[in-house]
Image (spheres, helix red, strand yellow):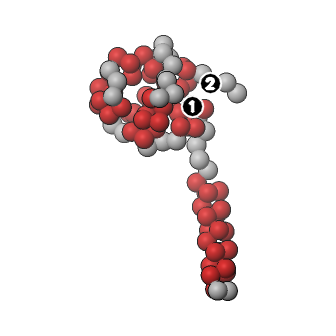
Amino acid sequence: MYFNQVEFGKRLQECRKLKELTQEELAEMVGVEKQHISRIERGVTACSIDLLPALSVALQVSTDYLLMGKSIDKELTRTQLLSVISQLTLITQGL
């Protein structure tokens, strides 16, 4: 699996639109020019490693999702957290 900047741009645009942000608003949030966001969304320019976390925070998505299209399995995470909570509860009851 390799990084595909065109697909990255599509995911970026999709996330931006879901947040109902314009390119200009997103650009302002992350400290770049509107044209830079446009070039990334069209796949003309790759996103820099410095910009990636800012985009992730601004759009409230994981960097994994932006980079590779992988989303977090929320149900698996929930199950794992409940298991840890259960184990901690047993430990604290024994204190």
Q: Which residue is mark 2?
A: 3
Q: Most extreme residue toward the front, as rendered?
A: 95
Residue 54 location, quadrant:
top left
Q: Which residue is mark 1?
A: 67
Residue 86 higher or lower than 51, as above or below: below
Residue 41 higher or lower than 17, as above or below: above
Residue 24 in the image: x percent, y percent? 29, 26
Residue 73 in the image: x percent, y percent? 61, 50
Residue 15 in sight: no
Residue 6 location, quadrant:
top right
Q: What kind of element bears circle 1?
A: helix
Q: Specify whether 7 is left or right of 57.
A: right
Q: Is 12 in front, or is 32?
A: 32
Residue 45 in the image: x percent, y percent? 48, 15
Residue 90 in sight: yes
Q: Specify whether 23 is left or right of 67.
A: left
Residue occupying image coordinates x 49% and y 23%:
47
Residue occupying image coordinates x 67% and y 79%:
91
Residue 38 higher or lower than 57, as above or below: above
Residue occupying image coordinates x 45% and y 22%:
41
Q: CA distance from mark 2 to mark 1?
A: 7 Å
- Mark 2 or mark 1: name the one nearer the start of the chain: 2
Residue 70 location, quadrant:
top right
- Which numbered dot is residue 32? none
Q: Is 78 in front, or is 86?
A: 86
Indicate the amino acid at tag 1.
Leu
Q: Quadrant of the C terminus?
A: bottom right
Q: Are marks 2 and 1 in contact (CB under 8 Å)?
A: yes
Q: What kind of element bears circle 2?
A: loop
Residue occupying image coordinates x 52% and y 41%:
62
